[in-house]
Image (cartoon, rainbow, N blue to C red):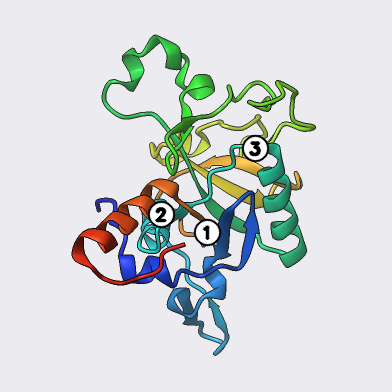
Amino acid sequence: MLLTPPVPELCAKRPKHWQLNGHWYFYTADEPDFQEVNEQGETVGQRVNWLEARNWCRRYCMDSISIETEDEWVMVKQNITDRGILYLWSSGRLCDFKGCDTREDLKPLKVNGWFWSGTNVKMAPTNAVPRSKTTGKSWVEQPWSPTGHTGAPQPDNAEYDINKTSEPCLGLLNGIYNDGVKWHDIACYHTKPTFCEDSEALLNYAREVNRIEGLGLTID
């Protein structure tokens, strides 16, 4: 499956559930387009794999959330905690593609090879607490979990030892390992909902299409 391009008409009416620093967000499980009825007759959020989650968001000029600042991490944690969400996808991804293993700046990949695919921004080393890019101060806590399936700090690529499936996608788990809301490396085929976040690149693309094709949309 390839990345889905934005649909200007959907971008103009994208869900706007809450805002932080000029970016709008929504939780896919709250939107009818991403809901289903389970066996008990209850309306619940659909769960999809990591790429499908990104593509859901991208149609609306958004992407799965990229947690680049501590303020954003606090906001995400609060939303997950208050709503009792067990798990979500983020846009976080390990650079395990062809050529990544030869880049000196990414070695070792487990530590230096993670990035936010929604914004193409490299993450801080996984063995260090992230620092603010504006103030240089460390975040209050390490967002990567200190434990997981094997009991080892994340990322641990634990599923590879079970069935030879790598764990190159970043999920947000809520207390599944009695660790609170933390980052975990997960195999991308697992299914979860996601938080969608405005993508400036996709919004600008849709605005240009709107201008060129004279669609008459308001994409703000």
Mark toward the start of the polypeptide (1 vs 3): 3
Mark toward the start of the polypeptide (2 vs 3): 2
Q: Is residue 129 among what the camera can see?
A: yes
For disc 2, the marked residue is 54
> How many discs mark residues in the rendered view?
3
For disc 3, the marked residue is 69
Kindly check if marks 2 and 3 are in contact, taking CB atoms under 8 A apart as contact.
no
Q: Nearer the viewer, residue 213 or 40?
A: 213
Residue 89: which numbered mark, if any? none
In percent of width and height, residue 199 lies at 45, 50
| Outermost residue toward the right in this view | 140
| Outermost residue toward the top in this view | 104
Q: Nearer the viewer, residue 134 or 192?
A: 134
Q: What separation in Å lies between label 2 and label 3 (alpha carbons)?
A: 20 Å
Looking at the rendered structure, the kind of residue marked 1 is Thr
Looking at the rendered structure, the kind of residue marked 2 is Arg
The residue at 26%/60% (across/down) is 211
Q: Secondary structure at mark 3?
A: loop
Q: Residues within 10 Å of mark 2 (few under 14, many from 20)?
A: many
Q: Nearer the viewer, residue 65 or 153?
A: 65
Looking at the rendered structure, the kind of residue marked 3 is Thr
Mark toward the start of the polypeptide (2 vs 1): 2
For disc 1, the marked residue is 194
Question: In the image, which is nearer the foreground, mark 2 or mark 3?
Answer: 3
Kindly check if marks 2 and 1 are in contact, taking CB atoms under 8 A apart as contact.
yes
In percent of width and height, residue 86 lies at 65, 59
The residue at 68%/25% (across/down) is 131
